[in-house]
Amino acid sequence: MFKRHHQIFTALRVVLDVLVVAAAFAIAHALRFGFPEVFPYPEIPPRGETLTVGILACILWPLCLRSVGLYRAQRQSTAVDEVFGVFKATALGGILLVTVTYFFRQDRYSRGALVIFTVLAFLGVGATRSLFKEALRALRRRGYNLRYVLVLGTGRLAKQVLAQIDAHRELGFRPVGCLSLTRARVGTRIDGTEVVGTVRDLRGVLFRQQIDQVLVALPTRCFHHLPRIMEICADTTVDVKLVPDVYQYATLFGGLEEFGGLPIVNLQSAGVLGINAVAKRAFDLLFSAVFLAVLSPLLVLVALAVKLTSRGPILYRQERVGLDGKPFAMLKFRTMRSDAEEAGPRFAERADPRATPIGGYLRRTSLDELPQLLNVLIGDMSLVGPRPERPVFIARFRRRIPRYQLRHMVKAGMTGWAQIHGLRGKTSIAKRVEYDLYYIEHWSLLLDLRILLRTIAFGFLSRNAY
């Protein structure tokens, strides 16, 4: 049933795409040659030549859309995925159209008209496909164009699958039942879906019921059932998908990759890499230089205040741990007496007796952190990232806080996701790690800018800063 529906919808998509491309070509031709006083052209191309180029476009565009996978069943794809695919197909189609028209001696046709057509084709195909996708999703919410799914498993993973199916009804998946590993669960319900048998009953269930897809949601310890499951499913035409149970071990940037055609599940990988690292570094250089220039009078005033109110150096260099767990010297305006750590390192406290006369104020307002703009400028730190910690404390945290070391997969920052949520001072280190890892996994320049703006607006005064 599903495959027949897919063929019908694919045919509709092809027809719709061809109609939109034909309309885009006609409009482009009219815009280019219909207003000679605005767009002068020495000679309007013959009707036969125009028709030839138009037919070529109507043939090439569906082929290009097919080449980027836009005629496959992709219920889970988003509107952004669809538009990006249309963009790739349009770029390919535009290049091929120019090449083919030249090859067939139709190169006299206006390049301006082809450019207008390409833009209109992208806008038209992108818009109609997005509308088509939304219309299908609306139908699926109403119970049409459904895919009937059999879930193998009744444990944690199966419950997650059923929850996702229920949360995304617009995708049109409907569970017809679950198969358990033991008879004890048969007849019970898992989040509203009946357990209709065991894995051994798979063949009978597949032949008795209308099923389009089998979702294997078994724990890794039960993967020895897979060969038999695949043997049974190979005697049918159902789709089979495996929900990997390895994501419970994933720590950072978990996902599927490919290595020479071999599928690999990535459980942990580095943070901001490649062009993202270049963009983040450019962001840091630009804003740290601007902040240093704008804040230079304030920096001079704070430096004078530190010098005049206590003995010792103006700047305090403290060893902290940054990217890849490597130490660096972090700069701060000195807020403690020179002998503050003669008894050993310890965290600062509220109303700390070791503080200089203006030290408490500098720490509460975070003005003591401003010299770290130099750390950012030279590349030891980033404007935004997990706050760096001292090696002596890191050794302690790593023993009692899982995944603590993953914070060092990106550069340490002057401010961070944890800090703008009030996690400073003697707040939970484990909670800070949770927020830091969220930041690393969801990093973007927009997120950095958001954190930076919130820090500027609210971050200099915090009840947990002392």
Image (cartoon, grey):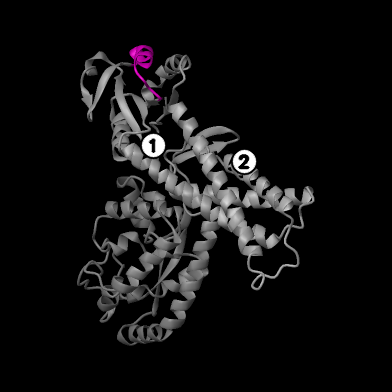
* Residue 123 % position (x, y): 52, 55
In the rendered structure, are the residues bearing label 2 and label 1 in contact, judged by CB atoms less than 8 Å apart?
no
Q: Residue at x 27, y 63 (%)?
A: 424
Which element carries disc 2, helix, strand or loop?
helix
Left or right side of 433 for 59: right
Q: Is residue 39 left or right of residue 201?
A: right
Q: Is 144 left or right of 35, judged from the image as shown?
A: left
74 or 260: nearer the viewer: 74
Q: Residue 305: x, y in percent?
A: 33, 86
| Quadrant in the rendering for residue 207 | top left
The circle on residue 291 is none
> For the residue carrying disc 1, how many other residues have a C-alpha within 10 Å: few (<14), some (14-19), or many (20+)?
few
Tell me where residue 299 sits by quadrant. bottom left
Q: Is residue 369 above or below residue 397?
A: below
Q: Is residue 145 magenta?
A: no
* Residue name at image x 40 percent, y 49 percent: 406
Crowd rating for badge 2 (residues with CA inside 10 Å; few <14, some 14–19, many 20+): some
Quadrant containing the N terminus is: top left
Residue interval drawn in magenta: 199-212
Task: Name the residue at 61% across, 59% down.
Answer: 28
Name the residue nearer the viewer: 243 or 353.
243
Give how far apart the Cα atoms at labels 2 and 1 are: 37 Å
Q: Which residue is mark 1?
A: 247
Residue 270 makes an appearance in the image: no
The residue labelled by disc 2 is 63
Image coordinates for residue 382, horizontal then vertical, percent: 45, 65
What type is the residue that disc 2 sits on?
Leu
Q: Which residue is farthest front?
A: 47
Q: Is residue 201 magenta?
A: yes
Q: In this view of the protein, which residue sits in the foreground, 31 or 185? A: 31
